[in-house]
Amino acid sequence: MSLHVGVRAAGSLTAHSRWCAQIHQQPAAESVAEAHAWMRDLHAENHFVLIVPTTEAALLWLRALPPEDPLRRLAQLPSDEALDIALSKERTRALAERIGLPVPGSRLLQRGTLPDDHPPEEFPCVLKPAASKVMVDGQLQNLAPAVVRDASLRTALLKKWLPHTDVQEQQWVPGRGVGVELVYANGRIVAEFVHERVHELPLTGGGSTLRRAAKPDARLLELSKWLLDALQWQGVAMVEWRRADDGTVHLMEINPRLWGSLPLTIAAGVDVPAILHDIAAGEPVQPVTRWKENISARNIGEDVRWMKANLRADRSDPLLLTQSLPAMFAGWLRAFSGREVWDGWHLRDPAVAIAELKGIARGLYAYPAAALRRRSLRRRIIKAHAARFGTHGEQIRPIRNLLFLCYGNICRSPFAERMAQRSLPGLDVTSAGFHPRSGRASPAHVVHAARVHAVDLADWSSREVTGRMVADADCIVVMDASHLEKMQSAFPEALERTTLLGLFNRGGPVELADPYTLSPEKTGVVMGEMTRAIAGLAKALG
């Protein structure tokens, strides 16, 4: 038996595995006809026994084929109707409610409508786009569920999403994620497994970066079976629940394909890929209903991101699934207990671990090197700022065109633009970002924080910086040293016209933090610092 893998991008860790006979470059997610031709050519050459869609795009490619198509039959998928219900959060909720499963209070807001004037009686609530991918101005954008803390945030998100998709508005329920994984073959369950999410990213709840094999939960298994039995399921599915500390559970959604925590499932003794192969090959399958409990699995790369978020998080915020620092660091000791595995790492397949370690090492080296470069560049800009604007705040050369820059042009630079347009009516003021995609909206918590300062970003649409913008600007104002590096790389000729906004706020921070991942409270602090800096800029410009 040989294993072939399709990858979306070169350099995938999967490509290093000794178990992969061949690696194939996939077509773009939107190219359904191209994907079908790609799969047919590969199948004609290799005569596959099983096709496993591991992404939603791959699942939708197979869903677009008729049920009798040979490729579709190799994938061990349920009916079109069952897949469509599983892929729709609203249809899943409606079915669950009809058969008596516990679901959060919910209502559907229709695509194309305006945000209504009837927000939920209690906040926070959760907004879930019916479609996770939408086309906006010819570009495919990902939409992720958001925890909304007040009416202004809710309105801002609905204005952004409702033109493109239905939105499910749902009661927020406390707790952590629990996944019930089931494999069906011809109407009967041949494998089951339950895991708990220990670390979730984002911290408001999401995919797991560290998970643990749970004890068999008879009630959750029964409820999950009711749901999938109602769909006459075939193949794999994970039914996702949210369980509070008091044991109360609510259904979240169905994941109708292999799940990201699959390494844990296999390590616990439930080898789902092997089971799928036996089903597809027509071989007898012995049901698996027990597993090793308290085994954990960690995605190293993603869990490092979780650690960074956990370190920065506001631990007093009840909406964030944080962990104490001692528990976070002590958790890594489980790797020496024999009770934890790391995704993709195996003694018999060391190339994957080596490749990931190299990436981590490059990151560790790159961080201090970049910090030194930024420190040197920052000193240079501070010295140039003093020379240009004078030690008493009097700028030397006239400025008529002002350009604010940050990375994404959705948080700091748009706020600075609109605040400066009000404070400096005689200047031509604009903003942009280094992010390669335009048309992105400001995050809801940033919109809310900006309104406190009478700046409306609800209708914001980001712009990518161009050479013409830079050439036209008499003064370019950036937010932190990373932006200075980007200017030095992309527009070195304009560095002498570039300064840091924080330098106009005497006594304040020289670099202004990115509010994108900050709590609403800390975002408000950054907006206050920016307001004082722009007032200092207005004074410097007379």
Image: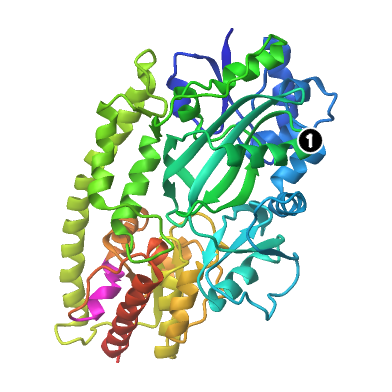
Position of residue 477 relative to residue 266, above or below, is below
Q: Residue at x 35, y 17 (%)?
A: 350
Along the viewing direction, whichever of 245 and 116 lies nearer the viewer = 245
Mark 1, residues whose alpha carbon is within 10 Å: few (<14), some, or many (≥20)? Answer: few
User: Where does label 1 land, which residue?
Assistant: 64
Position of residue 532 relative to residue 96, above or below, is below
Q: Residue at x 21, y 87 (%)?
A: 394
Image quadrant assignment for residue 51: top right
- Colour setup of the view: rainbow
In the image: residue 177, left or right of residue 110? left
Q: Residue at x 75, y 65 (%)?
A: 110
Position of residue 255 relative to residue 411, above or below, is above
Residue 152 pos. (x, y %): 55, 78
Q: Which residues are magenta?
A: 496-506
Which quarter shows the C terminus? bottom left
Q: Is residue 419 magenta?
A: no
**Residue flagged by tag 1: what amino acid is it?**
Ala
Position of residue 380 relative to residue 73, above or below, is below
Residue 298 pos. (x, y %): 38, 35
Q: Is residue 503 magenta?
A: yes
Image quadrant assignment for residue 49: top right
Which quarter shows the N terminus? top right
Along the viewing direction, whichever of 454 and 343 lies nearer the viewer = 343
Asked if one can make out residue 231 in the rendered structure from this viewpoint, the answer is yes
In the image: residue 523, left or right of residue 257? left
Along the viewing direction, whichever of 463 and 473 lies nearer the viewer = 463
For the image, the number of numbered tags is: 1
The kind of secondary structure element at disc 1 is loop
Q: Residue at x 76, y 68 (%)?
A: 112
Residue 294 pos. (x, y %): 39, 32
Asked if one can make out residue 424 in the rendered structure from this viewpoint, the answer is no
Residue 189 pos. (x, y %): 68, 26
